[in-house]
Image: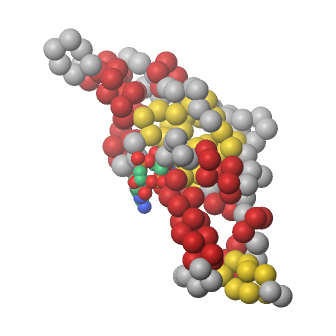
Amino acid sequence: MFIFIKGELKMDSMEDKTMSQVTVKDLMIPSEKVAHVQTNNPLEHALLVLVKTGYSAVPVLNSSYQLKGIIGKSIILNETLGLERFEFERLSEITVEEVMDTDIPVLHEHHSYIDGLKAVINDPFVCVVDNEQYFDGILTRRAILKQARNNYYLANQTTYQ
Ligand code: 4BW
């Protein structure tokens, strides 16, 4: 919710931060709430996680919880494509790190709202890491759109809950 304090519009739901002070940390889903798989997991396990959670793609971490890539349903299904049929038995023979997407953008917690907005134009979510690639969470397009909606109401000087 937005409130006026000394003539300035602020958000009371984010520790009274002004819009320009909102950072990726304020909007991201923290690591403990993010479904992920590990580099050495077989694709069979990754597909199970994706189907069970309902997500199209999730982050891939190593055993130290550093970000190594992203794996999605389409990459996995592509690996099962044989000449005449889907060869699902192959999923137990291939590990996530062999096929994951490693060319991915990342954000840091201190990045601004507009940095986050730019990042999710081309990707439904972007991983947030620290300087040593330890995984902090994800910023989703949904979180950015919700904030954009709030910005819209802010610009129209209405209150939205
Ligand atoms: O299980 C779900 N719960 C809710 N509340 N919404 C969901 C769920 N699954 C999908 N959605 C919705 C979200 O609006 O569909 C959008 C596209 O999902 P996706 O990409 O293709 O699986 C979701 O948009 P989003 O919240 O902006 O999330 C963007 C992408 O971020 C998702 C998924 O790949 C990833 N993601 C989101 N939350 C995650 C997650 N990955 C792992 N763990 C999480 N908690």
Q: Is residue 122 above or below residue 148?
A: above
What residue is shown at x 72% (from left), y 68% (from top)? 19
The quadrant of the rendering that contains the N terminus is bottom right
The quadrant of the rendering that contains the C terminus is bottom right
How many numbered circles are shown?
A: 0
Q: Horizontal and vertical percent for residue 153?
A: 57, 77
The quadrant in which residue 12 appears is bottom right
Q: How is the image coloured?
A: secondary structure
Residue 85 lies left or right of residue 27; in this view the side is: left
Residue 41 lies left or right of residue 28; in this view the side is: left
One can see residue 46 in this view: yes
Q: Could you say which is closer to the camera, residue 155 or residue 1?
A: 155
Q: Horizontal and vertical percent for residue 5?
A: 79, 87
Q: Is residue 101 above or below residue 124?
A: above
Residue furthest to the front: 156
Q: Horizontal and vertical percent for residue 79?
A: 34, 20
Residue furthest to the top: 83
The quadrant in which residue 82 appears is top left
Residue 127 lies left or right of residue 122; in this view the side is: right
Residue 104 lies left or right of residue 41; in this view the side is: right
Residue furthest to the right: 6
What residue is shown at x 37% (from left), y 27% (from top)? 76
What residue is shown at x 83% (from left), y 88% (from top)? 6
Q: Horizontal and vertical percent for residue 85?
A: 17, 19
Q: Could you say which is closer to the camera, residue 77 or residue 39?
A: 77
One can see residue 138 in this view: no
Q: Is residue 8 above or below residue 64?
A: below
What residue is shown at x 70% (from left), y 86% (from top)? 3
